[in-house]
Image (spheres, rainbow, N blue to C red):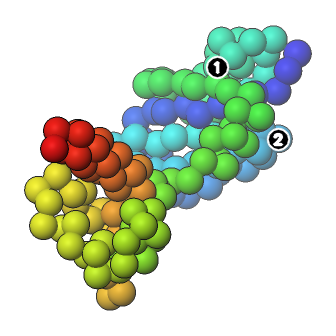
Amino acid sequence: MNTWHTTTTVPTTLSEDDAFDLLGTLTDRGAAIEFGTHTMTVSMTGYGDNALAAAEDAATTLREAIPGTEILGVDAQTYEQLDEELRRPLFPEVVGYAEIAEMAGVSRQGARGFVDYEEFPHPVIETKQGPLRSKAAVERFLSRKQRTRIKKTAAH
């Protein structure tokens, strides 16, 4: 039997005190609770030979701990999968004018001039130091701009 990381979503029916008591009941499972607007998610260790068995184990454990609760969803993943998920950044990589200038091989002033192009990506974050744009979107813009420049040069 293997251990799995499970997340089980149920309607929010517990008070904070009851949720604290639930954590005590599920201590051996390493449980954590997250409250949403209308739901509560319980993350804990599930046991089974595969993801389905672990999900069923988690759902059964939660039904026993909170009699009559409705299970809205259960997910199970290996701890290796969880670790990989947690390593992924929450936000896309962003770049400012200095990085855009370097990527395009132009001055910072030249990079600032890209805002005149309708297809130049909009900022995803505004800071006091200036706007930040998605690096992937800027790379696509520069790639399209380069292809357009080559086509125009070849036509002349």
- Disc 2 or disc 1, which is closer to the eye? 1
Left or right, residue 104 beside residue 44: left
Percent across and percent down for residue 51 are: 69, 16
Percent across and percent down for residue 75 are: 58, 25
Residue 17, picture quadrant: bottom right
User: In the image, is residue 50 above or below residue 14?
Assistant: above
User: In the image, is residue 45 above or below residue 94?
Assistant: above
Q: Is the N terminus in the top left, top right, bottom left or bottom right quadrant?
A: top right
Q: Is the C terminus in the top left, top right, bottom left or bottom right quadrant?
A: top left
Label located before the other in sequence (2 or 1)? 2
Which residue is rendered at x = 45% and y = 63% of the image? 103
Which residue is rendered at x = 76% and y = 35% of the image? 79
User: In the image, is residue 43 above or below residue 141?
Assistant: above
Q: Are marks 2 and 1 in contact (CB under 8 Å)?
A: no
Left or right, residue 88 beside residue 51: left
* Residue under label 2: 28
Secondary structure category for the residue under label 1: helix
Label 1 packing within 10 angstroms: few (<14), some (14-19), many (20+): many
Q: Nearer the viewer, residue 68 or 97?
A: 97
Q: Nearer the viewer, residue 141 or 75?
A: 141
Which residue is rendered at x = 17% and y = 52% of the image? 119
Q: The residue under label 2 is which amino acid type?
A: Asp
Q: Nearer the viewer, residue 141 or 40?
A: 141
Q: Nearer the viewer, residue 76 or 132?
A: 132
Q: The residue under label 1 is which amino acid type?
A: Ala
Q: Is residue 28 visible?
A: yes
Residue 55: numbered disc: 1
Percent across and percent down for residue 124 are: 30, 62
Q: Is residue 5 visible?
A: no
Give the CA distance from mark 2 to mark 1.
17 Å
Secondary structure category for the residue under label 2: helix
